[in-house]
Image (tube, helix red, strand yellow):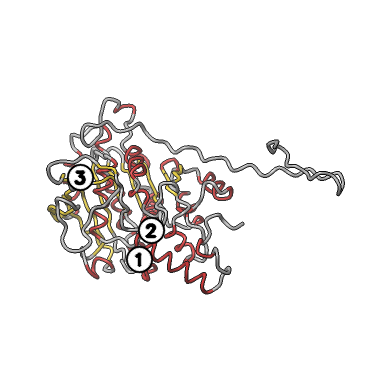
Amino acid sequence: MRLAFSCAARRGTAEGSPCAVWAFLIAGLCALALSGCGSAGMEIADSAAGPRPLSMFVVSTRKGESGALSEAGNDGEMRDSLQMIGVPPGHQVGQLERPSIGAPDPSRHFALVKRRNLDETAFLTELASHLSGRIGSNRDILLYVHGFNTGYDEARFRLAQIVQDGRFGGVPVLFTWPSTNNLLDYGAAKESATVSRDALAKVIRLLTETPDVGRVHILAHSMGAWLTMEALRQDAIAGSPKLNEKLGDVMLAAPDIDLNVFRQQLARLDPSHVFVLVAANDRALSLSRTLAGDRPRLGALDPKNEADRAALEALGVRVYDLTREADIFIGHGAYADAPDAVRTIGAQITAPRPQDANVQAVLGDRPVDDRIIAAPLAPPAAPAAPTVPAASPSATPATVVGAPTP
């Protein structure tokens, strides 16, 4: 049975014709090229007289922060740092304000304020210090793993934007890997993600074992979702002692994962931890499906399609349908671009536990919304009722049972 979100570019041209295939690939490449850029959210977040400083820990397997070493240099080694990012005053919820050319203006753009390189011992010491004395969900960690076609700057600024817009009061940690900015190097990016798998598994293990940590939430996007599930599976097989106790929500945004592969990855984990954010109109994942031999991608399953809905229900995970919030042209970055979507993520991970009922885990003075639980998947459309056969050729036409009377 062909799924509902099959190649849109084939409509209006002959099925499988060269023109149809090239039209689809070109449209998909455009989608991937733009999917790293935030669409403009027009709702204004809290503003201040100047940039608001936001600290984050960064673990990188890139050999550098720019150029070829940033995109392709990957030896699997971890490079740790503590960085401060400036969130511009007047920042718009859902938008990643960056200059089109030139250096960022801190009064208008996200910008790096300062950074300090750390070895592993210093990283763990600093992390424990940041968590010490915190209470409630402020003791939680949010680990962000970006996807394909994402540079170093975009990755750290995107995490800062998510923390700001989602009003997360815990400690943010970025895991960044060599994600090439060349669309033709999709395969090379997958190999870079594979090389980074051991490093991410180690990071997750270290975070869950950090003293005073509450829960370790993970937000992973696109190919980064595949990398995350591989690392979690690896930790689960190794018997990581704190994984089940400390793992919080694992949110997979537009996951670029083959459905059968995901089933194998999920078999090692408690599916109740996992949230999948899907969008049936995700054109970047449509291209990925084509490149993968027309194998369905998890992030593009359509809960309104009967077969897709059955597949999602069988997984036992929670599902957010972001199709309505997704950008009409791309849809691949809706988890962070759409104000309602990024706030939903923030509300999910800052939800107070019963023992923290009197604790307010917010940035600023506004309380976080109540925990937002994914709504049950809508039931499939009822099949059309059979028609009543006509009594004879001369009889009046048959009517559909249950149809409204004219």
Q: Please tell me in which quadrant of the rendered image residue 59 appears.
A: bottom left
User: Is 355 above or below relative to 302?
Assistant: above
Residue topped by disc 1: 189
The 10 Å Cα crowd at callout 1, few under 14, some 14 to 19, many 20 or more, is: many
CB atoms at circles 2 and 1 under 8 Å apart? yes
Q: Quadrant of the N terminus?
A: bottom right
Q: Closer to the observer: label 3 or label 1?
A: 3
Q: Quadrant of the C terminus?
A: top right
Q: Please tell me in which quadrant of the rendered image residue 328 appears.
A: bottom left
Q: Amino acid at mark 1?
A: Ala
Residue at the top extreme, as displayed? 358
> Label 3 to label 1, Cα distance in Å?
35 Å
Q: Please tell me in which quadrant of the rendered image residue 225 appears.
A: bottom left
Q: Is residue 196 left or right of residue 12?
A: left
* Badge 3 element: loop
Residue 335 appears at what percent x and percent y? 36, 48
Of mark 3 and mark 1, the one earlier in the sequence is 3
> Foreground: 57 or 68?
68
Residue 384 appears at what percent x and percent y? 68, 44
